[in-house]
Structures are given as C-alpha cells and as structure tokens.
Amino acid sequence: MDYWLWMYVVIGFSVYQHAGSLIVTDIFVPPIIDFRDNVTLSCSYDMGGHTLNSVKWYKDEKEFFRYSPMMHPVYMKFPVDGIQVSDGSNICNETTCKVDLSLLGKKSSGVYRCEVSEDAPHFKLTTKAANMTVAALPQNNPLISSFHSMYHIDEFVTANCSSDYSSPPATLTWYINGEQALYGELQPRIEHTIPAHDYNLQRQILQTHFYLNGPRFYNPTRILELKCVAEIENFPTLRRESTLKAFLVQDDDNLNNQMLLSSGYQNKSEHIVPHTILLIFAKILTFLLHQNKIFS
Ligand SMILES: *[C@@H]1O[C@H](CO)[C@@H](O)[C@H](O)[C@H]1NC(C)=O
Ligand SMILES: *[C@@H]1O[C@H](CO)[C@@H](O)[C@H](O)[C@H]1NC(C)=O
Ligand SMILES: *[C@@H]1O[C@H](CO)[C@@H](O)[C@H](O)[C@H]1NC(C)=O
C-alpha cells in the first residue's frame, strides 16, 4: 500500500515537472529614475520544476551580469558602457535575481533585459525587457511668486510659477479656483536652460494674469486659490504642485461694513431717531400752518 502511494507521488511529481513551463513572471526596472539615485533591478521567474541554469542581465543587448548557480564563480560581471554593478549586494536564487547598479548619468538609460535559461537537456530560454530613462528629475515643487494674501473683486491678479530645473523639462499648468486657467489668462512661457551633469536642465516660467470678475470668484468661501502643476510628459507619477490661497474681498463685504458701521453709530447715539421724528413732525406742522394760511 505504501509502495503504491509512493509511486503516485513520484509519477505526480514527474508529470508536474514536465507540465510546468519556464516563465519570467516579473521584471522590475523603473521607467524613469534620477541620475543621483542607485537602482536595484529585479527579475522573478517560475522554473516550472526545471533546474535553473543561468540568469543573464543585458543593457541594450550587451550582457553585463550573469548568475549561474552551478558554475564557479556563481556571479560574473562584464564591462558595458553606462553600467556599474555595485559590489557584494547581488542576490539571486531559484525564483528571483536582483542586481544593484550605481547610475552613471544619461548613458545608463536603455533597454534592460533579463534572460533565464533552464538546464540540460532542453536549455530553454525565457526573457523580459523594460526601458529605463536616467533623467535629472525635479527635486522641488514648482514655486509660486508675486501672489498676495488679499485681493479685491475687480482687481487684476498676476502670479508667476517656475518649475525646478529638470531634464526632461516640466510642463506647467495653472488652476484658478480649481479650474484650468484660460488661454487668454496666460502669458507666453519663458524657458531657462543650463547645462549640468551632461544634461540640459530646463526651467519653465509661466505667468498668469487675470481680472477678478465673474462667477468663478463669487464663492461663499471668499478664497482665491491658485494652483500650479508641474508635469513631465508620459510620467504621471512625477507630477508636482504648489497651491496658494488669498482672501477675496467682495463688493458686498464693503456694503456689510457700511451697514455695520451705521448700525453701530445708531446704537451709540439714540437721540438721532427722536431728532429725525421731531424734524418730520416740524415739517408736517409747517405744512399744516402753511395750508391754514392759504385757507384763511
Ligand atoms: C549609491 O551606492 C554607492 C555605493 O555603491 C554609495 O556610495 C552611494 O552613497 C549610494 N548613493 C545613494 C544616493 O544611495
Ligand atoms: C530568493 O530571494 C528572494 C529575495 O531576493 C527571497 O524573497 C526568496 O525567499 C528567495 N527564495 C528562496 C527559495 O530562497
Ligand atoms: C523602449 O522604448 C522604445 C522607444 O520608445 C520602444 O520602441 C520599445 O518598444 C521599448 N521597449 C520596451 C521593452 O518597452
């Protein structure tokens, strides 16, 4: 009985081994990264019961790293332009292979590919690739300047937004009380470029200039909110933004103030009311007297 059970296990296992197929389940290569960072690339695979022969990492089809658990040495590095593998921190096994890189600027950008091969007799290969761009990413949120803390309705507002220096450059968008600024409310954008670290770093400056009038500004919160968003095309996670708020003095604020003032005045000098009544009374009297004069 035990013998048959054992046979089922052995048969089951060998069927599983043959049915399983080798696949790269995942590759982790950041699509964009700052040149000042280090990066860990990782590749995960399912051997489907087969024995791992090797994992090879390529940059632009040039092999720079190899893990072959049955060979000596187990880890091998090959010189490739733009690649500097960090020492001693590479961890690979039957399911995952990680490689740490120190970035070398723009030339570390490229297509990174992980290739996994099984052992004899089939030596089947499987592979996955991903692009990585090494960029000079903005380090700070966009900066809003020349914006005041208080504005009056019917006033002009001018504010500048400048992005941090970056390559690729950021694109700026203004939002006024949550709505994107209209084309006519924007000045032509200004660009400043400086070469640094083999990049042409660019700063964008966008001025908004608009008239505080219309339903957009008559809101119960009496807040004028300006938001500037800096985005890098194709990389939505790199979005950065700044928001500033100002108090908005509306026309009815002035009216309310006048009412407050006059009611205060009335409360303090109550004699004004009887005085007015007396005046009216006197006018009626004069009128009646005048009438009497005419009739008499
Ligand atoms: C990158 O790694 C190197 C060593 O490989 C280290 O000296 C450096 O501080 C690391 N840089 C960052 C930003 O982590
Ligand atoms: C392989 O390495 C990864 C981390 O690199 C670890 O999470 C995993 O448990 C390891 N697997 C085995 C079978 O050792
Ligand atoms: C890498 O980027 C190039 C150019 O945008 C594209 O043609 C290619 O398909 C990308 N490769 C991968 C593996 O995503």
Image (cartoon, grey):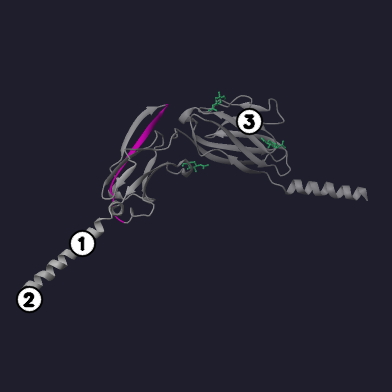
Judge by depth and name the residue closer to the eye, 121 or 221: 221
Residue type at mark 2? Phe
Count neighbours of disc 1 (C-alpha within 10 A) and say few if under 14, some if 14 to 19, many if 20 or more: few
Q: Nearer the viewer, mark 3 or mark 1?
A: 1
Residue type at mark 1? Leu
207, above or below 1, in the image: above
Mark number, residue 289: none
Disc 2 within 8 angstroms of ligand 3 (CB): no
Secondary structure beneath label 2? helix
Judge by depth and name the residue closer to the eye, 225 or 62: 225
Q: Earlier in the sequence, mark 1 or mark 2?
A: 1
User: Which quarter of the figure has residue 59?
Assistant: top right
Q: Nearer the viewer, mark 3 or mark 2?
A: 2
Secondary structure beneath label 1? helix
Q: Which residue is mark 2?
A: 295
Residue 34 placement (x, y as % from top left): 48, 33
**69 relative to 287 in the view: left or right:** right
Question: What residue lies at 90% left-to-right and 50% top-to-bottom?
Answer: 4
Question: What residue lies at 59% left-to-right and 30% top-to-bottom?
Answer: 100
Task: Give the magenta range.
Answer: 197-214
> Residue 119, can we see it?
no
11, above or below 65, in the image: below
Residue 196 placement (x, y as % from top left): 40, 27
Q: Name the outermost residue toward the right.
A: 1
Question: What residue lies at 56% left-to-right and 40% top-to-bottom?
Answer: 129
Count neighbours of disc 2 (C-alpha within 10 A) and say few if under 14, some if 14 to 19, many if 20 or more: few
Count neighbours of disc 3 (C-alpha within 10 A) and say few if under 14, some if 14 to 19, many if 20 or more: many
